[in-house]
Image: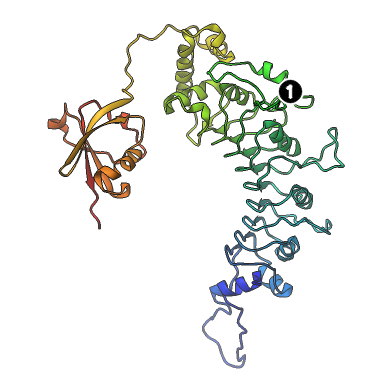
Amino acid sequence: MPSLLEAIDKKYGKEEVDNFDLDLPIEIYVPKKSPRNSIPSLLVLNDCDIETAGDEQELEKKCRGVEELDLAQNKLERWTEVFDILKHMPRVKFVNLSFNSLTEELFNLDDRNPFQYLKNLVLNATRINWKSVRDLLRLLPCLEELHLSLNNYSSVELSNDADTQTSPRHYCNVKKLHFSGNPVATWREICKLGLAFPTLGALVLAECPLQSLDPSPIIGNGSASEADTSPGGRTESECESNSPPGIDSPHSYFRKLKFLNLNSTLLATWDDVDRLSRFPELQYLRLQGCPLFEEYTEHERHQFLIARLPNVQTLNGGGIIGKEEREDAERAFIRYYLEKPESDRPERYADLVAVHGKLDPLVDVDLSPEKRVKVRFTCGEASEVRSIVVYQTVQELKQKLESFAGIPSSRMKLFYVDQDLKDITGAEEMRFPNKQLYSYNISNGDEIIVDSKQLK
């Protein structure tokens, strides 16, 4: 049964007893401890089969200076062992216990000595139950960031039986919550997180199967709302009229939220994007990989999101949205709906017309690149013509050419040959893996040469 102390000794060596003859003159300074015997303030012991704490006196001597502790992927199962470890680290600020099976409930907690410095706790894939989460939150008064991803939560239970709807327990210290990969499907459950953490500033919900941001109860087998999947659809006032008492809107309990990650959720309507625009403090949003965007190009998705989200400053980790970029997106949005029936126009359309006016339609000249072009691919003696989508990256094209060229994408080089300019410019190497093909102005009849990188 390996202990934390044994893992420390194995990694850093046991402390050696120094025997010096004090009668001998010493002229050269010799450090009493080698660097290997010093326990760092950041202690990382992943996948060491640790099950217990070990000798308490030795732990206290060795670990008093530890400020960050990473014990992910060990075999800790009892909270008593976890606290036997932590109590000898009075300065610890960060603890990662991910992928330890901590299903046991907490018992006999000592509230008299809370961990005053612990600010960041990672409990991903620990299967910790909600009662234990509540007990930990009570024990950690300074906790600011909590990770509860991959714990198979289908509901949120941060209020115990003694709590009532009128006086639920709040944990105002927690500012960041990671909740990715849990099978919570309704925004009504997510609202319980906002209720428990009223000052929450960052919330990560990636890969949760959320189908809507409507907090209304699910009726029958349908979703919370039967929203139109077109960029128009119902207004938020219509959605909120069905909300139960206590949840006025999707953002009722997220008044301080500035960062939200909804990547790879199941959001499928523009109504939900409009709901996001009403979060009062939301500035940083990640929203990719959702069914809503499947029929749009990357450029169209980006413009529609900017136009609908006036308060959001950055999208999907990009740079700050500038004034000119926002104005271009808003004007494109107006023109998109110019010839749509009035019933299909979202509320945001009227808002933007009030700012920019009712714009004239652009001259009907399509200057956008064709979505598909026929290109000749040449690799040595092999040659074939393929129809390719220009809205893909160079790296994606390389992966699709592996079977044709017999070269792994990691060792492949591509050269673009413009048939009209080849005598002047020659072949241009396609150096940048994330660059989209349309930016090369590829046309029907052009050629792409496939070659292999030289091994060094």
Q: How many marks?
A: 1
x, y percent for residue 415: 22, 39
Task: Say if 366 sits above or below 93 in the image.
Answer: above
Task: Give the residue at x 29% y 50%.
Answer: 411
Q: Left or right: 250 with respect to 286? A: right
x, y percent for residue 323: 48, 23
Q: Left or right: 367 with respect to 361? A: left
Of residue 403 and residue 18, the one placed in the foreground of this image is: 403
Q: Left or right: 321 with respect to 44? A: left
Image-quadrant location for residue 118: bottom right
Task: Say if 32 sits above or below 420 in the image.
Answer: below
x, y percent for residue 212: 62, 28
Of residue 337 and residue 211, the one placed in the foreground of this image is: 211
Of residue 381 and residue 349, the one placed in the foreground of this image is: 381
Q: Quadrant of the C terminus?
A: bottom left
> For mark 1, does the 10 Å Cα neighbourhood hold few (<14), some (14 to 19), or many (20 or more) residues?
some
User: Which color mode does the image show?
Assistant: rainbow
Q: Quadrant of the N terminus?
A: bottom right
Q: Residue furthest left?
A: 423
Question: What type is the residue that disc 1 sits on?
Answer: Ser
The residue tagged 1 is 243
Q: Secondary structure at mark 1?
A: loop
- Say if residue 440 shows up in the picture: yes
x, y percent for residue 432: 32, 40
Image-quadrant location for residue 442: top left
Q: Residue furthest bottom?
A: 23
- Say if residue 432 shows up in the picture: no
Task: Give the residue at x 61% y 71%.
Answer: 8
